[in-house]
Image (tube, rainbow, N blue to C red):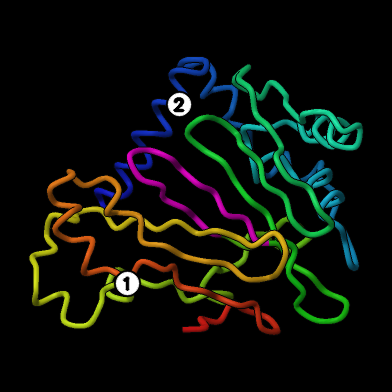
Amino acid sequence: MKMKIFYKLFFCTAFLLCACGIYAQKTLAVKNDSIENQAKPLKGIQTMRAVFSNMPDSITPVLTKNNRLDCIDFFDSHMKAIVKNRFSQESEMETLTKDYLSFKTSTSSSFEMKLLPVNDSTQIFCLVKHFYGPACDSEISFYNFSWQKLPSSHYISLPDMNDFLLPDSTRARDMSVIDMKLYQITLDSLSTNLKISFSSLNYLSKENAAILTPFFRKSPILYEWTKDRFVCKE
């Protein structure tokens, strides 16, 4: 766990320093409560366009509200939705549908968003942030339209490394070289499904990866949104 935290901190810090230096980090440190007071809650069934436009900056702090609004305008005009973010670096909205969005914030990070129905009159949204280094690692979180972060455990039970191992793999090889457990979570733009892959093998040396890869499943684990949570379909 400590190695995984170090991994994320290393690549996030590298991006911050390359973008604008230490001053940029101070610029980014906006008080969440003051931002959320400016972002009015939404009610009823929403579109991704409305959620992305109105949500507080604290949810995706590298982007300002003007960045988000400009991206939507560019997208509607059939132009590349590229803006200069808080670090004066290029960020691009790649996909926007009624209930899905994908956004490349930098060369080392991106995020996806998906609207999810809880009942006939209530939605929440799922946010998946990706951090790219030698391997991709993802974080998943859930929010309501009052912009409150919800307990992720209420909506998904995440797998661990053992769920990706083929039968008897733990006895076949020493897995201690995998000192960081990294997972790539991918939302489906066309459905309410998501996939989770074990990505730690991608940061190993070629020799260790060649030895260990045969003991892991090649396909991701599929989850399906059922009523009010993601359910594993394996």
- Depth check: 63 or 223 in front? 223
**Which x, y percent locates residue 152?**
54, 68
* Residue for badge 2: 15
**Which x, y percent locates residue 224?**
61, 77
Bin the neighbour count of mark 2 within 10 Å (Cα to Cα): few under 14, some 14-19, many 20 and up. Answer: some
Range covered by the magenta-colored residues: 126-140
- Depth check: 80 or 129 in front? 80
Tell me how far mark 2 sits from mark 1, CA to CA. 30 Å
- The image quadrant of residue 114 is bottom right
What amino acid does circle 1 point to? Phe
Res. 32 in view = no
**Which x, y percent locates residue 190?**
72, 64
**Mark found first going from the N terminus, 2 or 1:** 2
Type of secondary structure dominating the magenta stretch? strand
Residue 164: give its label.
1
Residue at 86 percent of width and 81 percent of height: 120
**Which x, y percent locates residue 227?**
70, 84
Residue at 69 percent of width and 21 percent of height: 84
- The image quadrant of residue 181 is bottom left
